[in-house]
Image (cartoon, helix red, strand yellow):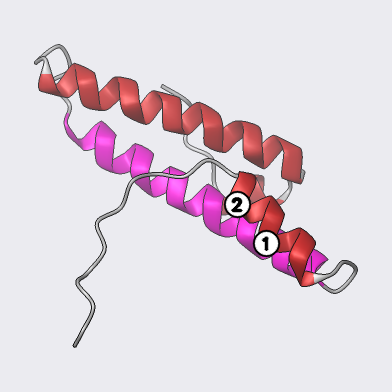
Amino acid sequence: MHATLTATELRNMTVADLHREIADHMAALGKTKIAVRLNKEKDTAKVKKTRQLLARAKTILAEKLMNAEVASPKKEVKETLKKSPKTSTVRAPKKS
């Protein structure tokens, strides 16, 4: 498992480093989930900790990209966000 990075450490990273960090944590999250389901990993809190670190890294990446929006058009920022790895989420049903 990766060492827990603080928000300050993540903010000091470049965009490319953040993309790499997000991809690494997504892979670690998948492996941890499988290990928990197969009862190979007893510390189920690792899943939650990894998800929180992943969310923190994605948030900081989005902040950096939005700050870069001043220098570049919105279209480029949106394309960059689309290229970043995504996690599966459950969405709330739409209100009628």
Query: What label does residue 82 carry, if any?
Result: 2
What segment is highlighted magenta in the picture? Answer: 44-69
Disc 1 to disc 2: CB gap under 8 Å? yes
> Which residue is most to the bottom?
96
- Image position of 9 with respect to 73: above or below: above
Q: CA distance from mark 1 to mark 2?
A: 6 Å
How far across and down, in percent of the image, does residue 62 sit?
Answer: 62, 60
Residue found 73% across the figure and 61% down from its top: 77
Does the magenta stretch mainly form a helix, a strand or a loop? helix
Q: Is residue 62 left or right of residue 68?
A: left
- Quadrant of the rendered image containing residue 91: bottom left
How far across and how far down the image is residue 47, in percent? 26, 35
Query: Between residues 21 and 5, which one lies in front from this camera angle?
Result: 21
Q: Secondary structure at mark 2?
A: helix
Q: Which residue is mark 1?
A: 78
Q: In the image, is residue 31 part of the stretch drawn in magenta?
A: no
Looking at the image, which residue is at 44% across and 51% down? 55
